[in-house]
């Protein structure tokens, strides 16, 4: 196969380099669960729709319908998503967008993971067993945790212990954290954080501590709180803040982002003080347009904020951590759930005597063709491109006596992330590039 334009390969004498077994994270897509219009009586015509958004090509793909009326949470692990949808838990393959398993359930709240177990917190209408444990393979029930005192929210694990927020539902008067022993799936104890932690819901971990976003109860004055619990000492503090607090967004570095006064603000965990109350502004709650859900892409410093009025299709605002708008994309009605699909991709190159890579690809992202710049002393024999699943999508072998190399055509490749490998007379050299 002969191709026209030439690659410039600068064979500079540099230090040795090897293919690394390390991996790097990248963001494949954003998954949104759209709950649709709430219908009070049958026949029901509007249901939960699940969609993906590709941040590279900026394409939206609605890939499934769940025949129920609301979504509660999504947990993404590798290429698998677990989705709570009112009376169902569904497991999706995010490579193929196919269902892998689904079960009926009730009182669903939040999701967490401990080793190979899916932890599901529960709420009204249940009156007991507010945490259940499922097998991630087929969603079969493994255990139900008894003796938790009320409705539950966020789930996290630290070391060999699982922690669950206990808010007691809309009639709760104090915030608690349930401590669960996963060796027996029994409740070890409940940590009572007191009345100043009322509305405890989202749990996050940072610097060995557990931080909770405690939502302002409905109809109460605009006062909320953030709590910090240290498992190593058993101590806790509740920091009251004079804003209306709602759902958490996530943590980036030492900053916690969550809903404040119908917008999204930032809170410094090291000082336990508000940094900014309006990173993302109130989209118009006075006219019944609200922030419905939000999440942080920690790799790209992006906030994904779903906005809507519960009646008509909404949109997701993409902004940076300073609140500057970058783009937006369409969603369905009542986008109550959003999650970021992170993946691992091989880095492949470490240069023992230099900080810069020995192989670069440009333009990156690419559209039609890519050019390679290689600074190494080994003779290149083959160019190989694989997709994120390891499938070879392009290969070019150098002919005997050929001194020049072609540009690599990529126009026919689907949009996404790829791994480009140069096989040399020594060792392989790898770089990644994005195809738009």
Image (cartoon, rainbow, N blue to C red):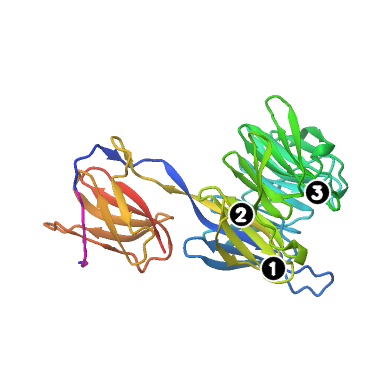
Tag of residue 333? 1
Q: State the image coordinates of residue 426 (x, y, percent, origin top left).
A: 22, 43
Q: Is residue 286 left or right of residue 393?
A: right
Reading the image, the residue beneath label 3 is: 222
Q: Secondary structure at mark 1?
A: loop
Q: Are marks 2 and 1 in contact (CB under 8 Å)?
A: no
Q: CA distance from mark 1 to mark 3?
A: 27 Å
- Residue at left offset 57%, top offset 66%: 329
- First-in-chain label (1 vs 3): 3
Q: Secondary structure at mark 3?
A: loop
Of badges 3 and 2, the one in the foreground is 3
Q: Nearer the viewer, residue 371 or 20?
A: 371
Q: Are marks 1 and 3 in contact (CB under 8 Å)?
A: no
Quarter in which the C terminus is drawn: bottom left
Q: Secondary structure at mark 2?
A: strand
Tag of residue 339? 2
Q: CA distance from mark 2 to mark 1?
A: 17 Å
- Residue at left offset 33%, top offset 39%: 355
Q: Is residue 227 left or right of residue 379?
A: right
Q: Which residues are magenta?
A: 3-10
Q: CA distance from mark 3 to mark 2?
A: 28 Å
Crowding around mark 3 (Cα neighbors within 10 Å: few <14, some 14 to 19, many 20+) is: some
Q: Nearer the viewer, residue 54 or 315?
A: 315
Q: State the image coordinates of residue 48 (x, y, percent, origin top left).
A: 70, 66
Crowding around mark 2 (Cα neighbors within 10 Å: few <14, some 14 to 19, many 20+) is: many
- First-in-chain label (2 vs 1): 1
Residue 369 in the image: above or below residue 113: below
Quarter in which the N terminus is drawn: bottom left
């Amino acid at each position: 196969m002969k191709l026209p334009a030439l690659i410039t390969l600068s064979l500079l004498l540099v230090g040795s380099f090897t293919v690394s077994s390390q991996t790097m994270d990248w963001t494949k897509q954003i998954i949104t669960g759209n709950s649709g219009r709430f219908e009070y009586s049958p026949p029901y015509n509007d249901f939960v729709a699940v969609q993906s958004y590709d941040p590279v090509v900026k394409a939206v793909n609605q890939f499934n319908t769940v025949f129920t009326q609301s979504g509660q949470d999504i947990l993404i692990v590798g290429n698998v998503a677990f989705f709570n949808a009112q009376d169902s838990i569904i497991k999706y393959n995010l490579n193929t967008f196919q269902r892998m398993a689904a079960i009926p359930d009730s009182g669903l709240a939040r999701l967490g993971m401990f080793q190979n177990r899916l932890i599901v917190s529960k709420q009204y209408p249940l009156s007991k067993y507010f945490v259940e444990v499922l097998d991630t393979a087929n969603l079969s029930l493994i255990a139900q945790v008894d003796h938790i005192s009320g409705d539950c929210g966020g789930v996290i694990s630290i070391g060999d212990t699982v922690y669950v927020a206990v808010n007691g539902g809309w009639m709760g008067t104090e915030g608690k954290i349930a401590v669960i022993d996963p060796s027996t799936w029994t409740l070890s104890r409940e940590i009572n954080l007191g009345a100043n932690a009322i509305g405890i819901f989202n749990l996050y971990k940072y610097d060995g501590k557990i931080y909770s976003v405690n939502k302002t109860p409905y109809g109460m004055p605009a006062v909320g709180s953030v709590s910090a619990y240290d498992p190593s000492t058993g101590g806790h503090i509740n920091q009251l803040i004079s804003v209306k607090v709602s759902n958490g967004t996530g943590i980036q570095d030492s900053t916690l982002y969550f809903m404040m006064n119908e917008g999204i603000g930032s809170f410094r965990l090291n000082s336990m003080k508000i940094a900014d109350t309006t990173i993302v502004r109130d989209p118009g709650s006075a006219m019944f347009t609200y922030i419905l859900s939000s999440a942080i892409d920690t790799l790209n410093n992006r906030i994904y904020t779903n906005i809507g009025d519960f009646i008509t299709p909404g949109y997701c605002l993409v902004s940076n951590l300073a609140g500057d708008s970058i783009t937006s994309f369409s969603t369905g009605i009542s986008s109550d759930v959003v999650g970021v699909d992170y993946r691992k991709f091989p880095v492949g190159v470490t240069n023992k005597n230099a900080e810069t890579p020995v192989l670069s690809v440009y333009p990156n992202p690419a559209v039609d063709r890519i050019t390679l710049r290689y600074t190494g002393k080994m003779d290149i024999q083959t160019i190989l491109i694989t997709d994120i699943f390891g499938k070879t999508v392009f290969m070019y072998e150098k002919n005997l006596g050929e001194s020049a190399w072609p540009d690599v055509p990529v126009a026919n490749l689907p949009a996404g992330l790829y791994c480009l490998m140069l096989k040399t007379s020594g060792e392989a050299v790898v770089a990644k590039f994005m195809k738009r």
